[in-house]
Image (cartoon, helix red, strand yellow):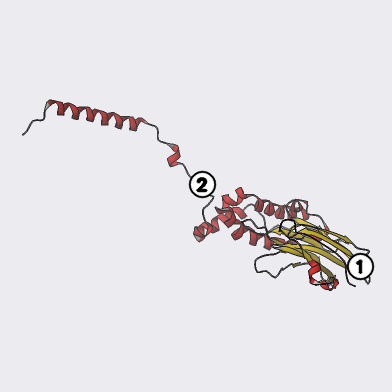
Amino acid sequence: MRKLPFFALFLLFAVSCKNENQSQQQNTEPISNEKNAMPTRAEDEFEIWDNLTVEEQEAREKQYLSKYNFNQTYTLKGINNELGMLFEDWDNTDTCSFYGGYYEDFRSHVLTPLISERIELHLKNPLTLNHNLLRVERKIYVEKTPDEKCKIYSFNIQAGGNNINHATYFQFKNHLGETTFYRYNSGYEEFDGVCDTVFQFKSDGKNYYMIPVYEKFGGKLYIFSIDNGRFVYHNEFFPDEDSRKLERWNSKITFNPITKTVSTIGDAGYGDSVIERTYTLVE
């Protein structure tokens, strides 16, 4: 057997000692908690709802719904708190992210259908027509006609992105005196409009209401009445279709219910392209 030179034996001994010291040092270092910690919700924020199993989706939804009592006998306070909590959660991206991963997923898969279901239930309750829902009104548009015969609710249903698209409901009494509602449909498949004010005027002793409805690319004025408990459009009052148009940006409307004069001003979105219209409704 060939013997190694002395200097080679010394080198092997030095390397062996170094490796042993490194091994002892690694064994005595504390274990990092960061590597073994459960991921926080912030790290989970961008998980995709559709990538969860059906069981995981149902568990998330059940966990969220557990804070509501949908079997209660509803008082005005109970309705106000339930709808108020739903609209507050809609605005709270942290809440949405906790239950549904990426907040847009939870909004579209859980909150949007749930809000539609609950508000359509409660808009049939005369309590919501005859009284204010203060907690709800802090989060969404709620307008009432001057004669208090109709209430208008508008709220965002766009789960994400830069656009804000609204659902708008009209609440009134039908021919039987029962509280009911009509949901505005803009004609677009995906987009509804927002209404933030209402005007009232009389023609031949009958009450009519004029509203602006803003959609994705602008808006229009509408006139309607409640005829024997039915929601009816009356856009024949406008002199032409162009007079109904509202510009996309900074639209302002004034209306004189005595002279029935309408004035609108707004920016079409092309720099200084401010457009003004003034006309009288046709009777």
Residue 159 screen position, x and y as percent:
62, 58
Q: In front here: 64 or 100?
A: 100
- Counting the numbered discs, the total is 2
Residue 156 screen position, x and y as percent:
69, 58
Left or right relative to 185: residue 104: left
Left or right relative to 90: residue 234: right
Residue 239 screen position, x and y as percent:
85, 71
Q: Earlier in the sequence, mark 1 or mark 2?
A: 2
Amino acid type, callout 1: Lys
Q: In front here: 70 or 196?
A: 196
- The vertical placement of 73 against 222, above or below, is above
User: Badge 2: few (under 14), some or many (20 or more) residues near its Cα, within 10 Å?
Assistant: few
Residue bearing mark 2: 43
Mark on residue 202? Answer: 1
Residue 67 screen position, x and y as percent:
64, 52
Give residue 273's quadrant in the image.
bottom right
Amino acid type, callout 2: Glu
Residue at the image point whose x is 83% and y is 65% from the top: 210
User: Badge 1: few (under 14), some or many (20 or more) residues near its Cα, within 10 Å?
Assistant: few
**Residue 198 appears in view:** no
- The vertical placement of 241 against 162, above or below, is below
**Helix, strand, or loop for circle 1?**
strand
Give residue 153's quadrant in the image.
bottom right
How far apart are the alpha carbons under marks 1 and 2? 58 Å
**Helix, strand, or loop for circle 2?**
helix
Q: In front here: 67 or 85?
A: 85
- The vertical placement of 48 against 210, above or below, is above
**Residue 21 appears in view:** yes
